[in-house]
Image (cartoon, rainbow, N blue to C red):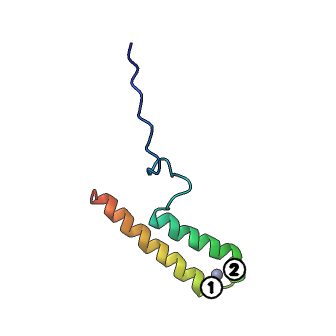
Amino acid sequence: MDERRDPEPPTGSRQASAGRGKLSPPTAAWNVYVQHCRSCKPCKDIDQACPDGARLYELWQGIAARALRSIARGA
Ligand SMILES: [Zn+2]
């Protein structure tokens, strides 16, 4: 009896590089925001405002919204 087997992904393919390859734009933007917040004193304090943190958060929101619109269009 023949057993169907999925072929091995070619070296360097997207699957083979998962986990160490390029992040999606929304994930990359979120990582930048989180990394900023981890090292920024005003971002850690709920009583303070951080313009850089706010800007990075808004940047992520914009990128994520574009990605969702792209998915909704079926692109
Ligand atoms: Zn900050």
Residue in the image at 33% along x and 58% along y = 71
Checking the image for residue 23, the label placed there is none
Residue in the image at 58% along x and 73% along y = 33
Q: Quadrant of ligand 1?
A: bottom right
Q: Which residue is mark 2?
A: 40
Residue in the image at 49% along x and 78% along y = 58
In the depicted structure, whether residue 46 falls above or below residue 12: below
Residue positioned most to the front: 11
Ligand 1 is within 8 Å of the C-beta of the residue at disc 1: yes
User: Mark 1 and mark 2 in contact (Cβ < 8 Å)?
Assistant: yes
Task: Say which quarter of the image contains residue 62.
Answer: bottom left
Residue 6 on image: x %, y %: 41, 32
Residue 64 on image: x %, y %: 43, 67
- Secondary structure found at label 2: loop
Q: Could you tell me the amino acid type at mark 1?
A: Cys
* The N terminus lies in quadrant: top left
Residue 65 on image: x %, y %: 39, 68
Which of the pair 7/68 is nearer the observer? 7
Ligand 1 is within 8 Å of the C-beta of the residue at disc 2: yes
- Secondary structure found at label 1: loop
Residue 2 on image: x %, y %: 38, 17
In the depicted structure, whether residue 75 falls above or below residue 40: above
Residue in the image at 70% along x and 76% along y = 39
Does residue 37 appear left or right of residue 19 in this picture?
right
Specify which label sits upstream in the sequence, 2 or 1: 2
Task: Say which quarter of the image contains residue 42.
Answer: bottom right
Q: Which residue is mark 1?
A: 50
Which of the pair 47/53 is nearer the observer? 53
